[in-house]
Image: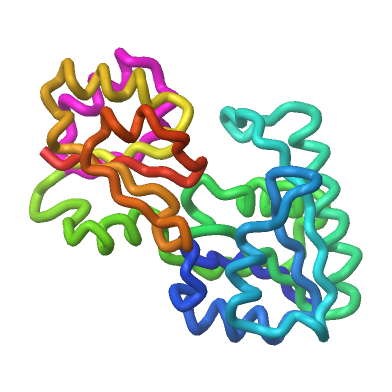
């Protein structure tokens, strides 16, 4: 039986795809790539196109609505997208191996693992392999020439959409914090970081590893700009 691969494509720079990830995709007959909007393009697929010719492959883009998922459960629309992708994968596995390229690393806030779980429900015996990728936070750390954590420091990765009380507890108790999904809550984050006297310890990385890459050391100014969805804040105390 053929194999389904979930492959991390890294943060944006095609040269940051792993050798194993690239070689695996080159050997797959079909690529099923996620995208956020029906009329949009797949960011992960765009990264792959920067390194390999896809003319001899079947390429399918599947839209996964950007709705909140909690405890592995999504809205009806989101779960329908998971099932649609899973069925497409099962159908195309008859023709050869199938790859699911996903931005960053599949283990970190990735649609890939929801597809994995759905497939395992539909076909428990199928073979699925996961190939890790470089995370956005690792790329931010490298661009900023700063470690994520050292020695006995505690690193926490958290969605910035948590409420202020919960975020405040994390920011107070942890040595190094990575905030994801910050673009729509910058005003609230700036106020909270200012209150905790952490504003000068925070750096915002926008589209790290991509063509539009920016580094914001002044978060007040960043809050007044139109930040891209792919923005991450690192706070090191």
Q: Residue at x 21, y 24 (%)?
A: 193
- Given residues 214 and 200, the one toward you in this image is 214
Res. 167 image quadrant? top left
Residue 126 point in image, percent of width and height: 76, 65
Q: How many marks?
A: 0
Color style of the picture: rainbow
Residue 213 point in image, percent of width and height: 40, 56
In the displayed structure, does residue 165 sit left or right of residue 195?
right
| Quarter placement of the C terminus | top left
Residue 225 point in image, percent of width and height: 41, 33
- Given residues 179 and 27, the one toward you in this image is 179
Q: Residue at x 79, y 42 (%)?
A: 81
Residue 113 point in image, percent of width and height: 61, 51
Res. 88 image quadrant? bottom right
User: Can residue 1 be seen here?
Assistant: no
In the displayed structure, does residue 208 sit left or right of residue 128?
left
**Would residue 93 be counted in the magenta stretch?**
no
Q: Residue at x 51, y 74 (%)?
A: 14
User: Can residue 141 be seen here?
Assistant: yes
Res. 95 image quadrant? bottom right
Q: Which residues are magenta?
A: 154-175
In the displayed structure, does residue 61 sit left or right of residue 116?
right
Q: Is residue 84 above or below residue 54?
A: above
In the displayed structure, does residue 144 sit left or right of residue 93?
left
- Given residues 35 and 213, the one toward you in this image is 213
| Quarter placement of the N terminus | bottom right
Q: Residue at x 32, y 24 (%)?
A: 189
Q: Is residue 75 above or below residue 126?
A: above
**Would residue 166 be counted in the magenta stretch?**
yes
């Amino acid at each position: 039986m053929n194999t389904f691969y979930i492959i991390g494509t890294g943060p944006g720079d095609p040269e940051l795809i792993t050798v194993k990830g690239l070689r695996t995709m080159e050997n797959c007959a079909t690529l099923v790539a996620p995208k956020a909007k029906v009329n949009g393009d797949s960011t992960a697929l765009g990264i792959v196109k920067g390194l390999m010719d896809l003319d001899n492959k079947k390429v399918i883009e599947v839209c996964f609505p950007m709705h909140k998922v909690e405890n592995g459960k999504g809205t009806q629309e989101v779960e329908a997208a998971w099932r649609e992708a899973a069925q497409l994968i099962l159908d195309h596995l008859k023709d050869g191996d199938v790859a699911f390229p996903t931005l960053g690393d599949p283990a970190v806030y990735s649609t890939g693992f929801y597809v994995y779980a759905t497939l395992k429900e539909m076909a428990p015996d199928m073979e699925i392999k996961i190939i890790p990728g470089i995370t956005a936070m690792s790329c931010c750390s490298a661009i900023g020439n700063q470690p994520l954590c050292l020695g006995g420091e505690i690193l926490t990765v958290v969605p910035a959409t948590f409420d202020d009380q919960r975020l405040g507890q994390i920011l107070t108790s942890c040595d190094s914090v990575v905030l994801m999904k910050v673009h729509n809550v910058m005003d609230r984050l700036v106020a909270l970081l200012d209150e905790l006297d952490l504003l000068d310890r925070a750096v915002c990385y926008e589209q790290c590893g991509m063509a539009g890459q920016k580094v914001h050391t002044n978060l007040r100014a960043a809050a007044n700009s139109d930040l891209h969805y792919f923005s991450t804040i690192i706070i090191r105390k």
